[in-house]
Image (cartoon, helix red, strand yellow):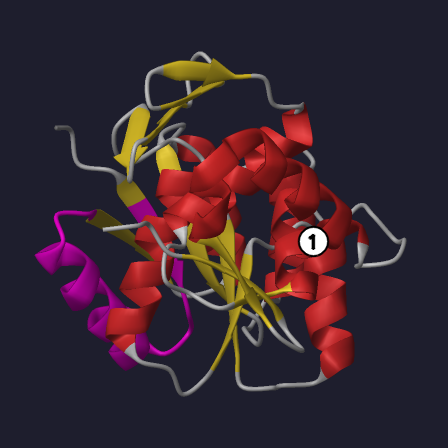
Amino acid sequence: MTQLKVMVVDDESRMRKLVKDFLGKKGFEVIEAENGEEAVDKFFEQSDIALIILDVMMPKMDGWQVCKEIRQYSKVPIIMLTAKSDEKDELLGFELGIDEYISKPFSPKILVARVEAILRRTNTLGDEKIEIGGIIINKTAREVTVDDEIIDLSYKEFELLTYFVTNQGVALSRERILNNVWNYDYFGDARTIDTHVKKLRSKLGEKGDCIKTVWGMGYKFEAEK
């Protein structure tokens, strides 16, 4: 498999090296940029960057501006790193099309796991088919089978099931599900998740029990043994 390229943008060389070392161990090719201007230049020089890890506070051009520049031309996944944990900053990042938002300090292992999860979700990494507990998701054909029977799912139901499966065992809040499956463009009641989950469970039949309710929070997908 060809090495996927990840660009790490941070004005701290130690931080770039730390992230590069952990990503390198997982087989990624890492491109470094020490400021926003360099990041934009390198991104447009190379058309095959699979994901960007982007710091907010940088000289010459900050992370917000880098994101704005790149989002005009590309939907490449972006993970934003920040020393701040202000809700307004997080909301701004989501409005600009950030895929994940991680506050410093962070665990490099968790960061790598997030990178892999995003690339799987965007169909850049991993197989085109996901098989788990009798459920088969064909991402290319956008088709789901349960015990060899094709299940008719709506676009959002398919996206929701895929998101659950790729985050198996993780307790997901309604807000997080909404942000990832509805791509930050839905401003209604987060309880719309409940309606879609109810329909999805019904269509999955007995396999619908794999979608567990996490009371007071959201849902978790656990495949039956």
Q: Is 135 or 98 nearer to us in this picture?
A: 135
Q: Position of residue 19 (x, y in %)?
A: 26, 68
Q: Is 72 or 2 nearer to us in this picture?
A: 2
Q: Is 83 or 32 nearer to us in this picture?
A: 83
Q: Position of residue 112 (x, y in %)?
A: 28, 62
| Residue positioned 57% across, 71% down in the render | 56
* 188 sits to left or right of 80: right
Q: Is 114 or 168 nearer to us in this picture?
A: 168
Q: Is residue 15 magenta?
A: yes
Q: Position of residue 133 (x, y in %)?
A: 29, 40
View extreme (front): residue = 206
- Point out the stretch of residues depicted in magenta: 6-28
* 77 sits to left or right of 155: left
**Vertical placement of 119 versus 84: above or below?**
above
Q: Position of residue 48 (x, y in %)?
A: 36, 30
Give the class, few, some or many, for how many residues have Cα within 10 Å of label 1's Cα (few <14, many ≥20): many
Q: Is residue 29 magenta?
A: no
Q: How many marks?
A: 1
| Residue positioned 83% across, 47% down in the render | 186
Classify residue 82 by image quadrant: bottom right
Residue 13 seen by the camera: no
View extreme (right): residue = 188
| Residue positioned 24% across, 51% down in the render | 30
| Residue positioned 42% across, 74% down in the render | 11
* 90 sits to left or right of 11: right
Residue 149 seen by the camera: yes
Secondary structure beneath dot 1 equals helix
Q: Which residue is mark 1?
A: 178
Quarter of the picture containing the N terminus is top left
- What kind of residue is marked 1? Leu
